[in-house]
C-alpha cells in the first residue's frame, strides 16, 4: 500500500529558488496566464527578483500545483500571480495559499488586483474593493485592499 501524496506549502525568496522550481513556477504561470487566458504579456516582469518578494507555492511530488507571490510595494504588501494548475482546481489550494500569504504578511496592510469574478473569493479573507473595476489585458479586474493603507500607498485610480 502506497501512502497518499500530500500537498506541501513552500516559501522562498528569489535567490533561494532552485532552477527546477523556478522553471516549474514560470511554466505554470505561462500555461495559465498566457496560453489558457490568451493574454500576450511578459509574465517575468522583473519583480520576481526583488529582495522583498516572497514566492509561495504548493507542491506535490515535485509538481507545482498552485502559486502566488507577495511583493513589497513601498511598505504595503501586494499579492499577485495567484494561479492554480488546471488539474488541481476546485481542491482549495488557492484558498490555502492566500491564507498562508496572510500569515506571512501578518498585520501589515495588503492589496491585490482580483479578476472581477473572484471578488467574493478574496472578500472571504477580508479584502474589500478599493477602487473602480478596470480592464487589464482585456480581463476585468477589481483593486482590493485589506487593512489600513497609508495615503501614499492607496491603489492608483485607473
Image: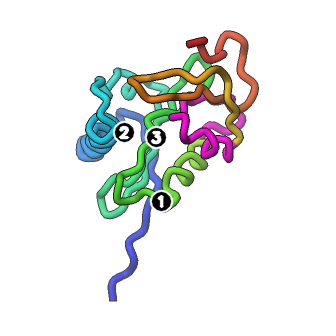
Vertical comparison of 68 with 41: above or below: below
| Left or right: 122 as drawn, with respect to 53 | right
Residue at 59 percent across and 26 percent down: it is: 143
- Badge 2, how many Cα within 10 Å: few under 14, some, many 20+? few
Q: Earlier in the sequence, mark 1 or mark 2?
A: 2
Depth check: 36 or 102 in front?
Answer: 36
Residue at 43 percent across and 41 percent down: it is: 12
Percent from the top left, x then y, of residue 123?
Answer: 67, 41
Secondary structure beneath dot 3 equals strand
Which residue matches tag 1? 90
Percent from the top left, x then y, of residue 148?
Answer: 75, 25
Residue at 42 percent across and 44 percent down: it is: 83
Which residue matches tag 3? 82
Q: Earlier in the sequence, mark 2 or mark 3?
A: 2
Percent from the top left, x then y, of residue 29?
Answer: 33, 39
Which residue matches tag 2? 16
Q: What whole-number distance in Å separates the C-alpha atoms at marks 1 and 3?
A: 14 Å
- Badge 1, how many Cα within 10 Å: few under 14, some, many 20+? few
The stretch in magenta equals: 103-125
The question of residue 62 being in magenta is answered with no
Amino acid at each position: 500500500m502506497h501512502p497518499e501524496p500530500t500537498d506541501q506549502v513552500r516559501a522562498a525568496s528569489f535567490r533561494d529558488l532552485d532552477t527546477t522550481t523556478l522553471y516549474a513556477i514560470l511554466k505554470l504561470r505561462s500555461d495559465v496566464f498566457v496560453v489558457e487566458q490568451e493574454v500576450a504579456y511578459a509574465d517575468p516582469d522583473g519583480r520576481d527578483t526583488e529582495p522583498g518578494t516572497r514566492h509561495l507555492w504548493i507542491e506535490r511530488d515535485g509538481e507545482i500545483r498552485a502559486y502566488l507571490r507577495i511583493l513589497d510595494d513601498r511598505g504595503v504588501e501586494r499579492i499577485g500571480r495567484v494561479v492554480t494548475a488546471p488539474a488541481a482546481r476546485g481542491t482549495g489550494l488557492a484558498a490555502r495559499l492566500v491564507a498562508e500569504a496572510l500569515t506571512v504578511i501578518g498585520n501589515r496592510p495588503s492589496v491585490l488586483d482580483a479578476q472581477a469574478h473572484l471578488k467574493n473569493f478574496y472578500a472571504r479573507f477580508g479584502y474589500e474593493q478599493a477602487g473602480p473595476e478596470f480592464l487589464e489585458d482585456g480581463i476585468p479586474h477589481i483593486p482590493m485592499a485589506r487593512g489600513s493603507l497609508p495615503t501614499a500607498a492607496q491603489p492608483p485610480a485607473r
